[in-house]
Image (tube, rainbow, N blue to C red):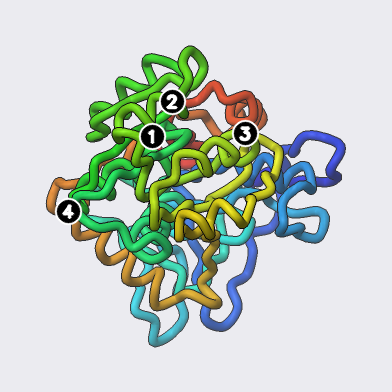
Amino acid sequence: MKAWIVQDLQGAPQLVEQPVPEPQQGQVLVRVSHAALNFSDVLMTQGAYQIKPPLPFVPGQEVSGHIERAPYGSAFKPGDLIAAKVVWGAFGEYAIVDEEKLIRVPKGLPLARAAALPVVWPTAWIALHDRAAVRAGETVLIHAAAGGVGLAAIQLAVNAGATVIATAGSDDKLELCRERGATHVINYRTSDWLQQVLDITGKKGADVIIDPVGGDITDGSMKCLAYRGRLCIVGFAGGRIAEIKSNRLLLKNASAVGVYWSHERDLDLIRRAVDDIGKQIEAGKLTVDIGSRYPMEKLNSALDDLASRKTVGKLILDIAGSD
């Protein structure tokens, strides 16, 4: 099969031929149709992510496709349409997936869009409904709102009855955020986003803040977090890990919480998230956005575009499918 391989952390991934992997007990073999990219893929190929696979490895964490082979007694059978999160191994024509990590593709959802489900949608759901316990009537500030997590979070927050303030770096990104339900949009490159949040909320601040950026964005978010507010730390795409002043949390009776999940520790929570997301998709209440699509041979171009913040929504690598 064809697969992208990280041979060393100084060079770009290489497209090579290698044997089809063999599933072990409790695993299925997936014929990959599409794979989705995450910023963590950029970091992992550079050795800068918290998970560091042994070299050489096939990068990529999200797939959609068909079951090629399933073990006896499995709830899945060959031909079933699935999406899944893997720790690594998505950017190849076949992938091994633990059965417990499989997601049945919601009815009517194309496989290309299904590839965008397994990471960002549970992340956004867990941030809002588990870590922040968002309530109807609250105000949710979402940074990097035109990214994968951001667009998912906008829709989930709106469906929960919250008012959304979205920040992004261009007018076209802000228009997409508005289309997905954001009431207020702010271009952080051309305006004082912190002051605008305070103006919009009557100086109260945001009840919930979704922060995948870190650095200066986290610093500013602490200044516009409402009393009893919840700051959700989703990532550090900006490169700097901010230091949070604990006195600000104390004086506001506020919380700063991490958003990080794994199937090993949070399986029941993930299943609840995926079940709710699937029902909302099938009811027509959620749109799974994808941005640019790349042929399999253009992975390095996709990684470069993702790293340079040129993208809107999820990037999709077309491995075998074109739907």
Mark 3 — residue?
A: 216
Mark 2 to mark 3: distance in Å? 14 Å
Q: Is residue 1 or residue 171 the one in the foreground?
A: 171
Element type at marker 4?
Answer: helix
Where is residue 185 shown, x and y percent of the image? Answer: 33, 25
Mark 3 to mark 4: distance in Å? 38 Å
Element type at marker 2?
Answer: helix
Q: What amino acid is at disc 2? A: Gln
Q: What amino acid is at disc 4? A: Glu
Residue under the point 63% across and 43% down = 236
Mark 2 — residue?
A: 195
Give the mark nearest the N terminus, 2 or 4: 2
Q: Is residue 212 left or right of residue 210?
A: right
Q: Which mark lies nearer to you, 2 or 3?
A: 2
Relative to 255, say whether 179 is above or below: above
| Whether label 1 touches label 2, CB < 8 Å | no
Where is residue 201 shown, x and y percent of the image? Answer: 30, 35
Residue that sits furthest to the front in the current view: 251
